[in-house]
């Protein structure tokens, strides 16, 4: 899945996480790009997971989509609706002093891109919208499981007929319901006709005011997250079909297929890909993880909902609303004499790049390297643990990354005196860990006495 990450701008809020923008596919220069937003409210995981999957697990084969899956990223991480009030009520006017000002400006800029002709905003709302009153959970005031439009028709060169398109989407979703009770309905808020003061301030009204099609898709907060994302994706796929955009997908579009895709092993690569954290039911803490005193604290993740957050003297990894693990760093000088290592896995010779994982059935063996020591975390055989066949039974499970006791870190250190020749620096496209605490001079001083960290790999036993 190819997509480009455009991360940018510094501004202050809780963790100061900027939302991501990913592109998938290639424009045919026909101004037919579909723009999809998730996470405008931080407590709506159905929408932000569905949007994130469009970047991680879809391949657009004809046409182009732009996806911003995590608009209120700070609120997503904090599991709150909106840290600075509701982001979706700031489109009519916003003070430059509002902490969300830059975010709103970035969203508007995406909407106003000439290539964009259709915008879909994903929400999770309470209950189930029904045109007539059924009960407290199912009635005209509820939002869940509805396709929302601001008006039936707009003045636009492409897709002016919002009501027909949304109705067709409702029918399409309803042909794949997990339960007939989940039936979708069309909700026309008639924003302008009724002078709906709340909806006039929302994202979709901003879009149609600029003569572009806008649809909000609502899944129900009364459904599990995978089912919400499933309904969002059913709707999105129909909108893409309407726009003539074609795609392939890495999972089956069923509630179970979506669940597996959302719960897939996460990857976090730290410090120019020197360290991989492969998070599959991870332990709640990771201790003594090498952190550089002489490099920037950057990272990359396998999806756009994952972030590494500085929190006092530790860090934590969060995936959407879900906490993953807390990292306690050991600060070290980093050295860069090589970026891959030769190892034996089950007697086979392999070249393994730092920041990757090797699967092992029986055992592995790290040949020794001059001037370098090997530290296998959870294997207690002295200062240098190269030139030893290591079996799973030799490992202390408490040191594995995962609760299952299968995944272990293998770290490579340059001995203090070795003075190895350095590789040329190559820069990667990475995000920065924001607001990391300034280090105490004693930590910097201690780092100068320790061996230098080069890189690490992971070994996963069967
Ligand atoms: Zn919402």
Image (cartoon, rainbow, N blue to C red):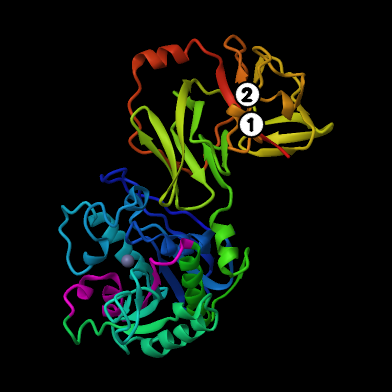
The reply to whether callout 1 and callout 2 are in contact (CB within 8 Å) is yes
Provide residue 130's location: percent of width, then percent of height.
34, 83
**Residue at screen point 58% across, 28% down:** 398
As displayed, is residue 177 above or below residue 60? Answer: below
> Could you say which quadrant of the image residue 433 lies in?
top left
The residue positioned farthest toward the front in the image shown: 135
92 vs 439, left or right, is left
Provide residue 128's location: percent of width, then percent of height.
36, 76
251 vs 18, left or right, is right
State the extent of the magenta-drawn residues as a range: 196-225
Quarter, ligand 1 = bottom left
Q: Secondary structure at mark 2?
A: loop
As displayed, is residue 425 above or below residue 241? Answer: above
**Residue at screen point 37% across, 67% down:** 124
Q: Secondary structure at mark 1?
A: strand
Provide residue 457's location: percent of width, then percent of height.
64, 32
Marks 1 and 2, the one that precedes in the sequence: 2
> Could you say which quadrant of the image residue 416 lies in?
top right
Numbered circle sitting on residue 408: 1
As displayed, is residue 332 above or below residue 407? Answer: above
State the residue in front, 419 or 95: 95
- Is 27 colored magenta in this rendering? no
State the residue in front, 327 or 272: 327
Q: CA distance from mark 1 to mark 2?
A: 7 Å
**Residue at screen point 43% across, 52% down:** 320
- Is 210 colored magenta in this rendering? yes
Residue receiving disc 2: 378
Disc 1 residue crowd, few under 14, some 14–19, many 20+, Cα 10 Å: many
């Amino acid at each position: 899945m190819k997509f480009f990450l455009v991360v940018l701008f510094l501004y202050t809020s809780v963790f100061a996480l900027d939302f991501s923008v990913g592109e998938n596919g290639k424009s045919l220069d026909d101004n037919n790009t579909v723009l999809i937003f998730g996470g405008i409210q931080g407590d709506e995981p159905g929408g932000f997971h569905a949007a994130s999957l469009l970047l991680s697990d879809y391949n657009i084969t004809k046409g182009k989509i732009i996806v911003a899956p995590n608009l209120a990223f700070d609120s997503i991480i904090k599991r709150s609706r909106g840290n600075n009030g509701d982001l979706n009520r700031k489109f009519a006017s916003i003070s430059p002093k509002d902490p969300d000002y830059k975010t709103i400006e970035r969203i508007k800029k995406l909407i106003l891109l000439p290539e964009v002709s259709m915008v879909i905003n994903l929400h999770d709302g309470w209950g189930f919208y029904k045109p007539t009153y059924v009960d407290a959970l199912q009635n005209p005031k509820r939002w869940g499981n509805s396709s929302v439009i601001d008006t039936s028709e707009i003045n636009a060169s492409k897709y002016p007929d919002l009501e027909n398109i949304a109705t067709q989407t409702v029918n399409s979703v309803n042909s794949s319901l997990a339960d007939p009770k989940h039936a979708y309905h069309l909700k026309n808020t008639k924003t302008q006709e009724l002078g709906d003061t709340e909806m006039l301030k929302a994202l979709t009204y901003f879009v149609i005011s600029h003569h572009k099609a806008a649809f909000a898709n609502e899944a129900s907060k009364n459904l599990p997250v995978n089912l919400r994302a499933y309904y969002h994706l059913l709707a999105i796929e129909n909108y893409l079909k309407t726009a003539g955009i074609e795609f392939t997908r890495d999972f089956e579009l069923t509630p179970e297929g979506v669940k597996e895709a959302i719960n897939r092993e996460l990857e976090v690569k730290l410090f120019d890909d020197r360290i991989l954290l492969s998070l599959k039911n991870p332990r709640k803490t990771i201790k003594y993880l090498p952190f550089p005193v002489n490099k920037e604290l950057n990272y990359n993740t396998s999806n756009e909902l994952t972030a590494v957050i500085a929190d006092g003297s530790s860090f934590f990894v969060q995936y959407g609303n879900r906490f993953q693990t807390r990292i306690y760093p050991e600060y070290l000088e980093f050295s860069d004499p090589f970026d891959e290592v030769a190892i034996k896995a089950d007697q086979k010779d392999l070249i393994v790049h730092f920041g990757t994982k090797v699967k092992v059935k029986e055992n592995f063996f790290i040949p020794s390297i001059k001037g370098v020591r090997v530290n296998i975390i959870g294997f207690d055989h002295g200062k240098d643990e190269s030139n030893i066949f290591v079996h799973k039974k030799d490992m202390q499970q408490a040191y594995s990354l995962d609760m299952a006791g299968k995944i272990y870190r293998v770290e490579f250190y340059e001995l203090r005196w070795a003075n190895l020749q350095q590789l040329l620096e190559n820069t990667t496209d990475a995000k920065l860990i924001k607001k990391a605490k300034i280090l105490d001079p004693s930590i910097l001083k201690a780092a100068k006495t320790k061996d230098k960290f080069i890189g690490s790999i992971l070994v996963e036993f069967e």
